[in-house]
Image (cartoon, rainbow, N blue to C red):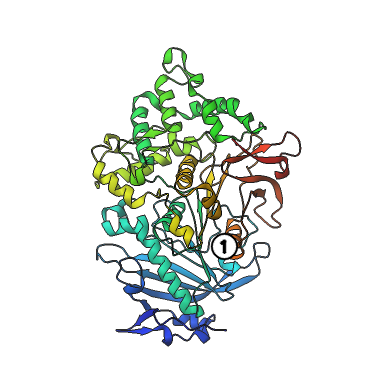
């Protein structure tokens, strides 16, 4: 059965505006109807954020692997490329890709971005933390779409340089994702003759922030959302790096050998808090209360070697792992950054790679090699977002000096509004997923945000539409190592969980995450519970530690 296309959905062809009655829905879901989308324009009035309208540059049939276990089998989809024009002629367009499977399940997924964006998100990649045996969404029948957020890194001197243009900055903050949603929805409706019955957003890291922004700013647009490891305190996290860099310039830098010594001391204090000495700090909040870096103090407080910490290095570690008050409240009254948890200090993607680096922060630098990820991000943020001067020395940064600009950035970017009542009232569902040993952004951000939502809306109401999970022992990309060298189980089909909740009302409880081979038949070698916060997986004291049945979700 074909459904009539709403007369309110208007596409311009040539000079005049036409309703989509000119696009024959009876031809939908085949090659000719895909090609017919090319050249169509979407009027600016049909996009819920200020723009110059959208144009479809190309539309052609492509194939995608239908099932990772049977890579020879494929499914066809219509790949649509286009862009949303800016208002400011100096601003870049918002590029998008929309993928329309010919075997459609009637639903859609918008992908989030990552980092500073600037790369077109195709909507074809595996979702964050997905199991290896799970087909990508378009192969499962979902229409998908993504965006570059309104700038192209290939055209920039540095990844943060887009922020010098106000419209590009606003697009990155929130507007590009609204534009892409509205365009994707209209293109899907044109192709299939009806709108998606359910529309989801799925993002991690920066994309996780975007996911939270959609729930907060545009609660009517998405039926359900997955927000994994979101950069919720987008502005405030940079103030931590500012304070840390000052200490690192004055003897506070922890070299990799000192970080390894720190890791050993953390494990000695915290590894057994979850009932199992395996290298994973599952009781991540309890560890913060149990471990004091002063146990590593060098004799007399001066730096006497790699197996101890000087007084200024202990202070630097406390800057990383304790709350840092802001000099003034940011958006939604947030007054501090909560700090980081312990757990992946010397592992790839952990504290060395993300926070301390292979060498102290410097500016200018002839190379970013060896610089911590957080320092590199902070440098770009301060110079382009705040000072709006590529030559500004981030080591000279003062939050008080730039207070008005920081407040403006916070209002644009921070995803900290605890009022989700509109999203809840429309029946929205939200899955938040944090990583317990994440040094690029901190799981304590999600914990503080979740508590703020509960304080505002009440636990009973929150339980109706939010599930908040934490995976201990894994870093920002979702990787972690046991002391044996084996991976921490961390893969799960969150899209399937979200879809079952939104579509069938199947409320998710504790989940199971797995470690599996990356090639068919994707054998599962280990599993662990994925517990709802504030619970964590505690070993029961007997049973195979590679089996989730040997653990119980327990409150810290």
Of 417 and 154, the residue lying toward us: 417
User: Residue at left 54%, top 43%?
Assistant: 435
Task: Please provide percent x and percent y for residue 31.
Answer: 52, 81
Asked if residue 499 lies left or right of residue 25, the reply is right
Callout 1 secondary element: helix
Number of numbered tags placed on the structure image? 1
Of 54 and 460, the residue lying toward us: 460
User: Residue at left 54%, top 80%?
Assistant: 29
The answer to whether residue 520 is above or below residue 254 is: below
Of 35 and 401, the residue lying toward us: 401
User: Residue at left 30%, top 43%?
Assistant: 382
Asked if residue 70 lies left or right of residue 189, the reply is right
Q: Is residue 43 visible?
A: yes
Task: Please provide percent x and percent y for residue 314.
Answer: 44, 23
- Quadrant (top left, top right, bottom left, bottom right) of the N terminus: bottom right
Task: Please provide percent x and percent y for residue 313.
Answer: 42, 24
The answer to whether residue 290 is above or below residue 546 is: above
Asked if residue 536 lies left or right of residue 342, the reply is right
Classify mark 1: residues with Cα within 10 Å, few (<14), some (14-19) or many (20+).
many
Of 529 and 328, the residue lying toward us: 328
Task: Please provide percent x and percent y for residue 330.
Answer: 33, 43
The answer to whether residue 138 is above or below residue 35 is: above
Q: Is residue 357 visible?
A: no
- Quadrant (top left, top right, bottom left, bottom right) of the C terminus: top right
Asked if residue 182 lies left or right of residue 74, the reply is left
Q: Residue furthest top?
A: 300
Residue at numbered disc 1: 502
């Amino acid at each position: 059965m074909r459904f009539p296309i709403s007369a309110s959905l208007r596409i311009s062809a040539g000079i005049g505006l036409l309703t989509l009655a000119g696009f024959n829905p009876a031809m939908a879901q085949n090659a000719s109807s895909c090609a017919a989308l090319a050249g169509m324009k979407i009027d600016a009035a049909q996009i819920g954020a200020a723009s110059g309208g959208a144009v479809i540059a190309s539309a052609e049939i492509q194939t995608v692997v239908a099932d990772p276990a049977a890579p020879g089998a494929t499914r066809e989809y219509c790949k649509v490329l286009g862009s949303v024009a800016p208002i400011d002629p100096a601003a870049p367009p918002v590029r998008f890709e929309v993928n329309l499977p010919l075997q459609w399940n009637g639903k859609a997924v918008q992908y989030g971005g990552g980092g500073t964006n600037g790369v077109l998100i195709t909507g074809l990649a595996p979702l964050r933390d997905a199991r290896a045996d799970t087909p990508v969404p378009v192969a499962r029948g979902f229409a998908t779409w993504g965006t570059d957020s309104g700038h192209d890194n290939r055209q920039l001197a540095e990844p943060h340089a887009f922020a010098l243009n106000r419209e590009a900055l606003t697009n990155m903050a929130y507007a590009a994702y609204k534009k892409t949603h509205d365009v994707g929805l209209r293109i899907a409706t044109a192709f299939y003759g009806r709108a998606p019955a359910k529309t989801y957003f799925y993002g991690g890291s920066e994309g996780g922030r975007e996911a939270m922004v959609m729930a907060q700013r545009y609660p009517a647009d998405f039926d359900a959302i997955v927000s994994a490891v979101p950069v919720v305190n987008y502005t405030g996290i940079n103030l931590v790096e500012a304070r840390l860099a000052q200490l690192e310039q004055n003897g506070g830098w922890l070299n990799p050998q000192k970080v390894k010594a720190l890791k050993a001391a953390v494990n000695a204090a915290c590894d057994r808090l979850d009932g199992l000495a395996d290298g994973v700090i599952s009781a991540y909040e309890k560890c913060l209360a149990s471990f004091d870096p002063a146990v590593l103090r060098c004799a007399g407080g001066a730096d006497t070697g790699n197996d101890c910490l000087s007084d200024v290095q202990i202070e630097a570690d406390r800057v990383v792992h304790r709350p840092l008050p802001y000099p003034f409240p940011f958006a939604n009254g947030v007054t501090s950054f909560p700090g980081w948890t312990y757990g992946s200090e010397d592992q790839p993607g952990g504290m060395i790679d993300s926070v301390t680096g292979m060498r102290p922060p410097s500016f200018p630098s002839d190379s970013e090699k060896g610089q911590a990820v957080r320092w590199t991000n902070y440098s770009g943020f301060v110079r382009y977002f705040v000072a709006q001067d590529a030559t500004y020395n981030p080591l000279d940064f003062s939050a008080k000096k730039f207070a008005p600009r920081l407040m403006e950035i916070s209002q644009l970017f921070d995803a900290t509004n605890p009022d989700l009542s509109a999203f809840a009232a429309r029946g929205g569902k939200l899955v938040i997923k944090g990583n317990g040993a994440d040094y690029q952004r901190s799981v304590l951000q999600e914990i503080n945000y979740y508590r703020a939502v509960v304080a505002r809306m009440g636990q009973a109401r929150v339980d109706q539409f939010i599930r908040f999970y934490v995976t201990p022992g894994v870093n920002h990309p979702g990787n972690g190592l046991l002391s044996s060298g084996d991976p921490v189980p961390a893969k799960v089909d969150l899209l399937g969980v979200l879809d079952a909740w939104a579509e069938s009302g199947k409320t998710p409880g504790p989940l199971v995450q797995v470690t599996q081979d990356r090639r068919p038949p994707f054998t599962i070698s280990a599993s662990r519970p994925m517990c709802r916060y504030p619970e964590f997986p505690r070993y029961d004291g007997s049973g195979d530690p590679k089996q989730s049945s040997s653990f119980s979700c327990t409150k810290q």
